[in-house]
Amino acid sequence: MLFSLLLWAQPFVASAQVSETYLVMVHEDNCPWCEAFEDEVGKFYHKTPESEKLPLKRIDYHEKMPSHWQVKGAALFTPTFIILREGVEKGRIEGYPGRELFWWRLSEFTQ
């Protein structure tokens, strides 16, 4: 009986493990570079192939990062883009260098 109950519950346990793979954008209100990113990239990022690999998650500069994320330190300015794979920081893009340079820098993490 217990064995069959464990077999029944196992798929639910496996599905509870959520991948924490994101492009985290640390932003702040009234940040002109954050606004430029939103205008040039952010408003359509969810439609790109990159978003399938690294969905965009926005976090306010004044919020604490989730404690289970392993990041290499706080963002010092906005915007800062942190590439997380399985909850571990793999890289970051500090500042918004413009649309073309942003896509070029992001491609280092999506190939």
Image (cartoon, helix red, strand yellow):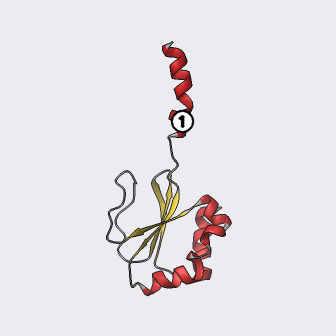
Amino acid type at circle 1 is Ala
Image height of 64 relative to 77, above or below: above
Q: Position of residue 80 (x, y in %)?
A: 44, 73
Q: Looking at the image, which residue sits at the far top?
A: 1
99 vs 4: above or below: below
Which corner quadrant holds the C terminus?
Answer: bottom right
Q: Residue at 61%, 64% (x, y): give it.
A: 51
Q: x%, y% of residue 65?
A: 36, 61
Q: Quadrant of residue 78?
A: bottom left
Count of numbered labels shown in the rendering: 1
Seen from the viewer's position, the closer of residues 82 and 43 is: 43
Query: Of 100 and 2, which appears nearest the observer?
Result: 2
Q: Position of residue 88 (x, y in %)?
A: 45, 54
Residue 73 x %, y %: 35, 63
Residue position marked by numbered label 1 in the rendering: 14
**Residue depicted at 55% across the width and 17% down the height:** 4
- Nearer the observer, 64 or 77: 64
